Image (cartoon, rainbow, N blue to C red):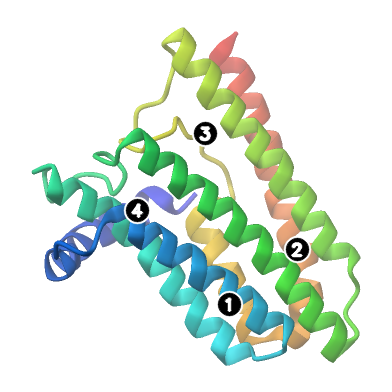
Amino acid sequence: MLDATARRVLDRPLSRLAGLVDRSWVSPNRLSLLGLATGLASAAAAAGQLWWWALGLWVFSRAMDGLDGPLARRRRGGDPGGSAQSSGSEAGGFLDITADFLVYGATVVGVAVGATRQYDADWLPFLLVLLAYYVNGTAFLAFSSIAERTGRQRDDGRSLSFLGGLAEGTETILVHSVWLVIPDHAGVIALGWAAVVGVSAVQRIVAGFRDLS
C-alpha cells in the first residue's frame, strides 16, 4: 500500500547515495548479496535474543536492498528520478526478489525462535505469517509470469509485474522493525500482521484473476 509513496520519497536520495558508492569494486549484485548476508545475520541475532543488533543489521540489510537498483540504473545511465528497479538486469532482478523472500522468511523464523525462548511466545502466529507470505508470493509470482507471457503485465518500472495490496514491502520492513524493537509483543504483532498479509493475499488473488480473465 505504501510502496509507491516510499519510492517517490526515497528514489532521489537513494540515487544520490548510489553516486557516493559507485566504485569499480561495488556492483548492484554485490549490494544485493550484502543485503542478503546482513538480513540473515539479523535473523540469527534475533534468534539469539540480540534484539538491537538484529535491528541494526535489519535496517542495513534493507538499505542495501534499496540501493542496488539505483546503482544499476546509474551504471546504465538511467534517469535519477526513475524507479529503483527499472534498470536492473533480469539476473539482478531475479537475485533481488529471491534474496528478499529468503530474508523475510528467515527474519520471521529468527524472531519466532528468540521470542519463544525469551518471552514464551506462541509459535502459531509466526507460522500463520509464513503461510500468508507463501500465498502472497505464489499469487504475485504466478501473475507476473503469466502476465508477461500474455502481454498483460503491470509496468511500474520494477523487474516483476507486481500486484499491489494492503501489505507490501514498505509495510513488511516496518512491521519487522517493530518486532525487533518490542520483541516481548512479537507474538501479538505477528497475529495481527498475519491477518493483514492474509487480506493482501486475497486482494492479489482477486486482482490477478480479473486481470488475466
- Residue carrying label 4: 29
In the figure, residue 160 lies in which quadrant?
top left
| Residue at the spot 60% in from the left edge and 16% down from the top edge | 210
| Residue at the spot 51% in from the left edge and 26% down from the top edge | 144
The relative height of residue 7 versus residue 141 in the rendered view (above or below) is below
Classify mark 4: helix, strand or loop: helix
- The reply, left or right, for residue 143 in relation to residue 16 is right
Q: Residues within 10 Å of mark 4 (few under 14, many from 20)?
A: many
Q: Residues within 10 Å of mark 2 (few under 14, many from 20)?
A: some
Give the mark nearer the N terminus: 2 vs 4: 4
Classify mark 1: helix, strand or loop: helix
Identify residue type, mark 1: Ser
Nearest-to-viewer mark from 2 and 4: 4
C-alpha gap between disc 3 and disc 1: 28 Å
- Residue carrying label 1: 42
Nearest-to-viewer mark from 3 and 2: 3
| Residue at the spot 45% in from the left edge and 40% down from the top edge | 94
